[in-house]
Amino acid sequence: MPTDERRYIITFGCPDRMGIVAGIAGFLADAGGWIVEASYHTDPDTGWFFTRQVVRADSLPFGVEELRTRFGTVATALSAESGWKVDDTGEQRRVVLLVSKEGHCLYDLLGRVTAGELDARVCAVIGNHATLGPVTRGHGIPFFHVPFPAGDPEGKAAAFARVRQLVDKHDPHAIVLARFMQVLPAELCEAWQGRALNIHHSFLPSFVGAKPYHQAYTRGVKLVGATCHYVSADLDAGPIVEQDVMRVNHGDSVADMVRKGRDVEKVTLARGLRWHLESRVLVHGNKTVVF
Amino acid sequence: MPTDERRYIITFGCPDRMGIVAGIAGFLADAGGWIVEASYHTDPDTGWFFTRQVVRADSLPFGVEELRTRFGTVATALSAESGWKVDDTGEQRRVVLLVSKEGHCLYDLLGRVTAGELDARVCAVIGNHATLGPVTRGHGIPFFHVPFPAGDPEGKAAAFARVRQLVDKHDPHAIVLARFMQVLPAELCEAWQGRALNIHHSFLPSFVGAKPYHQAYTRGVKLVGATCHYVSADLDAGPIVEQDVMRVNHGDSVADMVRKGRDVEKVTLARGLRWHLESRVLVHGNKTVVF
Amino acid sequence: MPTDERRYIITFGCPDRMGIVAGIAGFLADAGGWIVEASYHTDPDTGWFFTRQVVRADSLPFGVEELRTRFGTVATALSAESGWKVDDTGEQRRVVLLVSKEGHCLYDLLGRVTAGELDARVCAVIGNHATLGPVTRGHGIPFFHVPFPAGDPEGKAAAFARVRQLVDKHDPHAIVLARFMQVLPAELCEAWQGRALNIHHSFLPSFVGAKPYHQAYTRGVKLVGATCHYVSADLDAGPIVEQDVMRVNHGDSVADMVRKGRDVEKVTLARGLRWHLESRVLVHGNKTVVF
Amino acid sequence: MPTDERRYIITFGCPDRMGIVAGIAGFLADAGGWIVEASYHTDPDTGWFFTRQVVRADSLPFGVEELRTRFGTVATALSAESGWKVDDTGEQRRVVLLVSKEGHCLYDLLGRVTAGELDARVCAVIGNHATLGPVTRGHGIPFFHVPFPAGDPEGKAAAFARVRQLVDKHDPHAIVLARFMQVLPAELCEAWQGRALNIHHSFLPSFVGAKPYHQAYTRGVKLVGATCHYVSADLDAGPIVEQDVMRVNHGDSVADMVRKGRDVEKVTLARGLRWHLESRVLVHGNKTVVF
């Protein structure tokens, strides 16, 4: 069973009640669908039910659009409040990256795409500095330099309008803030909700905001971390997708923490992005289920 | 939804084919069963399908014996090769511990049981030395000292016969070798297959056999580990349930490794035992699925 | 070279300048001192120099009091601002534990002392509840129940006065708040400065104060942690000695996080206490150097 | 104190005896040397003493050659068996990389060098396949394709002779086998002893030799790892510099393990190489001290 065969990924959520699993499984079985992955979760606090089901495309006698139509009927019957999506792995994921000067996350993601590890197409890289243009173009990917004038609110708004235009024309599955050092305005957080992923260089909720490694150094913590989260209007407070940490000690300067932290940042972002692109991350309120 | 409410846990395996999920989910839905946890896996190499389903006991109109009868029919219909089990959380798990002189795993497990963290009853502790008798009895648990005479095969066989008798009268769900320093004879491995858990003090398959920390020290590894596995006739080669590691460095003597390793051993064993008692571990061939 | 042979541990700090290492090493060499461990660190921000030196007691022609006198002269000559201490491993460390109802840290520490892993004597355990009395007394250690009347400031002050009296009569090297749920008053923080260790059940500075696992659950973090720190007048803000974390996921309830977190708490506290008792932890400002 | 200021790094080893620390510290103090880092270790088994001292170059009234001459006299006086080295951070480290088709370690190392994280010059990359030529040349680094004919011992010997020539003309401080899939012949192991670093894609000593992830998958381990070690004539048995692991589970195919393992490999190799280039790794017998 080659893992690159085409599959449909159904994600679904609604208030929990008896018979949902059977309802979905029965629908798929009746249509001849071969389920190759299935995950379930009910949140005990909110009573919300979540599922993700992966079906072999060649096991169904119809295409993805027909599946969407038919599953929509099932979903509505199961709950009027249900939210759902059907993704087709036959459609390559499109990603746009926003960067600044620091290249470690960009290098890492481009390396993964080149190696075929992330089945995605990087449509564009947008930088508020020109620093990372050459390496991006060296990978055959368009790079756009959109300067953000400091202390000029109008100039900044114009820059964000330009970024939005460059991003939206690709209708990307993911917009990745790969150490982009600008705070997204509320309207972009809204427009890209559930698609914009940020990597914050601390183990949130510790050290929100600027210079988290300096904050960590001053506090004398024994581990530094990184957090991949969805961008929301509240700075560094969106739903967390993945976190990891690395040990530091008294011998580590701020510069050492920055250096060690980079390895956590790039791996944490890559994992979060991968799960997002595989439709493994379901958001409910300010929390995520990662199947 | 209190987590201590009574539940039935169905575990099931068979060669994968279309419709198994729907078959089981449909059966449960028809009976009014409320599924609160459901996990699935298909092994791509062997094509074996595994599932674990947890149902609220109060959602079914019949008891566990009737559920076993009815589910048996479903299981056989799904596959002649199927293997399955229905566990009832209303029946407390029974555990027997085998120990020697080292007490860290015993202390840790007794502490967890006392704190109500492990919902199990320790029916007996059996030691080939008397060392750990007082602490065991201090917890109100019967302790049996069964000496193993060195260099006396017949005496050893008699000792194992006595151990077997002491264990089997409780028909325990788990027999835990909590740093028991004797190698089980083949007939006990056979009799207790799938129920006897060992903690080996290395990251297997490294450092099989005696004195693994000495082996680790000599090789100069930078991490030491522990492995919780089912006992099989091949020494330290049974199906692995859980593993973990801890960092060491050139400053650590063998005694330091032994000391640091204890913390890994006790946590790894406790996790493995917990998963086993919750029927989360499904064995197929020499590998485990841990749901 | 048995590790239990008697040693003197010198810890020393002063503003960094050229020649400190040579000054101390020369003094020891002239006296015939055999250094078996030596660590150095200079903090680049404050320019403060730290060292810890371990000398075989039998290599010196005089006793610990004479060493203190002579080393004092050297220390003063090196810097008028120097701070230093000479500990003698021949004098067993004395520890008093403060507890409440949760026993996992207490069980763990008592297990380590019983196993000879921590070379210390637990002089007394004091609980604001009686819950952990039997297990403490079962280890042959005196237990004192000092109730803390809720909503009665005077009664609370009297209780703390009683605790102080019970603690101070042992002049302990360490006062361990092993999940003691009362906030120490400022005068006790002052009196026990540098000797009182707390285990906080979060990865500080995240989730200061009460119910950190509930806070972690609400925020949806993917790791939970624990922090061993010196107690200071600012709640949960004292110098951090050790931290560690454990992975959690969306399937973990608050109760699961509490359970998993216990394993991190007990190991983190045990490591911090061990390092403190071995004079490995040097405090400067609000940060620690752990040699 | 900028961290990029010039420093001399002294590494020294000899049989332990009283007065070594004082001897070295006294020599440096007499010369006005300002020690900014100092580490010591004595191996209890072999009785071998190790130290690493870092001195500010501008604190000494003479240059590195004079330091070598003078320290040589001190070293000989301390022990006729002493081994030592004085490195000058003013001389940039030279590195040659050997690769095959897999690029993740190469990409990662080049990214670190470009970002200024590793203060080294990559003089050349040599591949037994041409695959990684373009990305190497894109970084402005010479790439040499040296094919290794399968099943042709003479052709292989000629290829190794060519590799040796390409490497040795740079007299590199490190030769890094960054997932180079050829076994070095004994004479190259000899010639490059203590300078050739390999990354093996398992937690050694588990899974020596070919296809370690397949071996790990078959054994059903719950963690996969990577090992950075010095190359020796015994395959995968040289002194270990660094190891790390990552959690896997039953849902991970061999391909998933390979993918997850890459993140461990590249980070483990980068750490090992960094420590080697900073003269932090002292080898004695088949073990390392990492200061």
Image (cartoon, coloured by chain):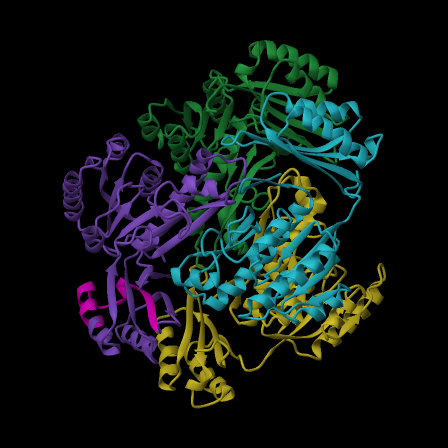
Chain colours: A green, B cyan, C yellow, D purple
Q: How far across and down, in percent of the image, does residue D36 sit?
A: 35, 64
* Magenta stretch, residue numbers: D48-71
- Asked whether the viewer can see residue C159, the reply is yes
Q: Residue furthest front?
A: B154
Q: How far across and down, in percent of the image, does residue D92 sit?
A: 24, 51
- Residue located 33% across and 26% down the image: A139
Asked if residue D56 is among those painted magenta in the image, a careful observer would answer: yes
Does B60 sit left or right of A204 as displayed?
right
Q: How far across and down, in percent of the image, does residue C101 sit?
A: 77, 60
Does A40 sit left or right of B152 as displayed?
right
Q: Nearer the viewer, residue B186 or A179?
A: B186
Q: How far across and down, in percent of the image, does residue B49 sit?
A: 59, 30
Q: How many marks?
A: 0
Examine the image and state in which quarter residue D123 appears.
top left
Does C149 sit left or right of C186 as displayed?
right
- Asked whether the viewer can see residue C204, the reply is no
Does C81 sit left or right of B270 as displayed?
left
Q: Nearer the viewer, residue A72 or B207?
A: B207
Examine the image and state in which quarter residue D237 appears.
bottom left
Q: Nearer the viewer, residue D189 or B163?
A: B163
Q: Quadrant of the C terminus of chain A?
A: top right
Instruction: Examine the rendered structure and indicate whether residue D158 appears above or below residue A278.
Output: below
Asked if residue B68 is among those painted magenta in the image, a careful observer would answer: no
